[in-house]
Amino acid sequence: MSHGSAAVLHGLPVPGSAIQRVSFTQSVRGRGHVSGSVHVRGCPLEADEITEIDGVPLTSLARTVSDLARELPFEWAVGVADAALRLGATRPELLDEVERARRRPGNRRARAVVTFADGRAESVGESRSLVIFARSLIAEPTLQHEVWCDGVLIGRSDFGWIDQRVLGEFDGRVKYGRSRLRDETAEDAVVREKIREDALGRENWLVVRWIWPDLDHPDMLVRRIRAALASGRDMAA
């Protein structure tokens, strides 16, 4: 198994388009074929590019990233590479795999994906946000920035523009659920988050939140971030 099918077994996030068919790669040169719900590709496979999960042979983590990085949209491919880094892959391993495939179509983009990737991004949404920021020439934020006050951790935010004292949080509504404590209701989580945000405000931090649909309108998101950074600079001054 390979591509999107291998990604699922490795625990990598992929868009639905990548798993519409079950993907296999045969270690032969050729164009491959599509038959019903199966997509078979012909491409050389080295022994160290094959692994096994639950008895199923599949492409290695690095090979899977390399394959997908040549085919997926850039922002999604970055999300896949970020997830692989979080799972324990290293950038040199991914770059070595990309180098092996240097003669294959799309490999220049795959190299750009691996070079851009940062395993500190904790979700595809965060990865896509970083791509939007980079394309829009927004200053690179600090990832998973922690805010402390008098030795007490107030909170950790997905993105931090420290000089402007702006924090960015992707998919804030979902995080109310993700961060719920044991025996805590959703309402309790919202109240606790409001208390946290008030504490950040008292320390002159401006918080900007966005959700998944906002990523489909990058121009609007960029305007919001730029406005927040401008306000943050005024507050810091």
Image (tube, grey):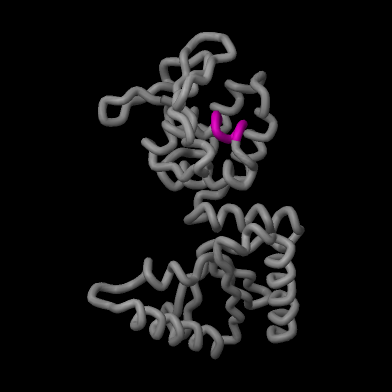
| Image spot of residue 83 (x, y percent) | 47, 46
Give the image quarter of residue 207: bottom right
Closer to the camera in the image, 150 or 12: 12
Q: For the point 42% across and 31% down, which residue is it?
A: 6
Q: For the point 44% across and 67% down, which residue is it?
A: 174
| Image spot of residue 154 (x, y percent) | 44, 80
Q: Is residue 1 left or right of residue 82?
A: left
Give the image quarter of residue 224: bottom right
Q: For the point 35% across and 77% down, which residue is it?
A: 186
| Image spot of residue 59 (x, y percent) | 43, 25
Identity of the residue furthest to the bottom in this view: 202
Identity of the residue furthest to the front in this view: 36
Query: Magenta stretch: dominant SS?
Result: helix
Q: Is residue 236 magenta?
A: no
Closer to the camera in the image, 38 or 187: 38
Q: Is residue 207 left or right of residue 185?
A: right
Q: Is residue 215 left or right of residue 34?
A: right
Quadrant location of the N terminus in the rendered image: top left
Quadrant location of the C terminus in the rendered image: bottom right
Give the image quarter of residue 234: bottom right
| Image spot of residue 147 (x, y percent) | 50, 76
Q: How many marks?
A: 0
Segment tinted magenta in the rendering: 66-71
Q: For the point 71% across and 74% down, which residue is it?
A: 229
